Image (cartoon, rainbow, N blue to C red):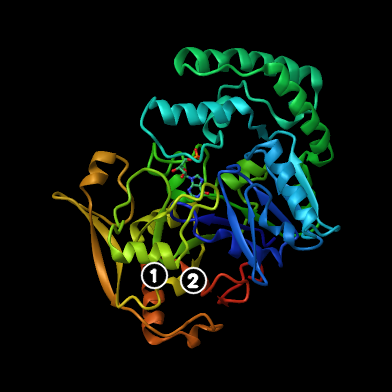
Amino acid sequence: MANVIVVGTQWGDEGKGKVVDIYAKNADVIARFQGGNNAGHTLVVKGEQTILHLIPSGILHAGKICVIGNGVVVDPPVLIGELNRLRDRGLLPASTRLYVSEKAHIIMPYHRRLDIARELHGVGKKIGTTGRGIGPAYEDKIARVGIRLCDLLDEEIFQEKLNRNVEEKNFYLTKLFGEEPLDGRAIFEEYRAYADELRPYAADVSLIIQREIDRGRKVLFEGAQGTHLDVDHGTFPYVTSSNTVAGNACCGAGVGPLAARSVIGICKAYTTRVGEGPFPTELQDETGARLQQVGQEFGATTGRKRRCGWLDMVLIRHAVRVSGITGIALTKLDVLTGIEKLRICTGYQTEREEFTESVPANLRLLAQCRPVYEELDGWTEDIRGARRIEDLPRNTRRYVERIEEMASARLVLISVGPDREETITLNNPFAD
Ligand code: IMP
């Protein structure tokens, strides 16, 4: 059993799409287990860019089973649109199968409206959400009023649940936010059409995955966002509304806790964050602007500029612990080329104590933290042609080695450019 979980170690956008795409070649099943179309995985294949928000990145490989697990929240028009676009561009191999868990909760128009209204009208602090209705959809799941795919597919149940929800949500929209109400009948008609399109994909994905595992097939669990956006382990409340850590691969796909043997943590060679919230190593200077520009750090979902800063090993160590990461995939190393002096944050210092293993939970305390840096010499050589660790310049190797030492997890992959080929593979987790 060589099943692998891939998760982000920072605040998302670590380059998971490329790594998952590479590993997908060795996997038989690729499963997403949390999040929704707030995620955006940018893939570059033969110079052509594809952005996937919901469908697992493995879809581009022929003969794979791609799964959207029960832990994902699904926006039907987004999923249908993504499938149609892939099909139109000839990127959907006929032998690839997609299954969507019948237990996955559906994002409804009122979820998007409430998400945006809350951010606009300032109920609570602004989180800087993607406005895709992710939080409200998960709220309804926990409140036990959400609509699952199997409910959408049953007209009677759908009608009943929709009526109840529209009545309640219109109350909030009109009375609390002073907005126009939603038309339940129009939603019913629109979503009935989506139901017909999604029916062929609906399945008991837990069972499908287990049957594949029993046959000795390899599963890749594809996480979205990053550890520090996890609703329990991240910088709450500036987080997303799901668990992004590796443990949720089991819950969100319906497999037991021993289903995976490796957990690969994706770590960008510097740090970025979209939306609000604390960011101790943020650079609001020329270096930050340079990272943003050279790294093309724009949100794949919202197009917002990402905030940029130095690599923060407190974040990474915290992530290694809470996800049980066994290997690190380091991405976007080439973006650092040409910066004379590089800094790595080794800890946070307050007047009273230093934090090296964990990000403090108390936001007031976190705001007092000053990053402690280790400085390293940079490099000017173009590293995009490197395919072995020995091909990297001495200073690059030093940077990479320090990350490995401080993370207490071995490096399994180094990405030196956006293309599939621009990669140094050290250990393939599927081959272990
Ligand atoms: P939500 O997930 O749309 O509710 O947004 C909550 C927070 O998570 C915001 O700060 C978003 O910018 C952030 N977020 C959500 N998805 C991603 C992602 O895929 N990459 C980076 N940030 C994300």
- Give the image quarter of residue 287: bottom left
- Give the image quarter of residue 311: bottom left
Separation of marks 2 and 1 at Cα, in angstroms:
9 Å
Residue 361 lies, in percent from the top left, at: 32, 41
Q: Which residue is mark 2?
A: 411
Circles 2 and 1 in contact, beta carbons < 8 Å: yes
**Of residues 312 and 190, which is closer to you in this image?**
190
Marks 2 and 1, the one that precedes in the sequence: 1
Identified at 39% across, 24% down, the residue is: 123
Residue 240 lies, with reference to residue 5, above or below; the image says above
Residue 288 is left or right of residue 10, and the answer is left
Quarter that holds the N terminus: bottom right
Q: Is residue 221 visible?
A: yes
- For the residue labelled by badge 1, is the local secondary structure a helix, a strand or a loop? helix
**Of residues 376 and 410, which is closer to you in this image?**
376
Identified at 64% across, 71% down, the residue is: 47
Quarter that holds the C terminus: bottom right
- For the residue labelled by badge 2, is the local secondary structure a helix, a strand or a loop? strand
Q: Which amino acid does the dot numbered 2 rest on?
A: Leu
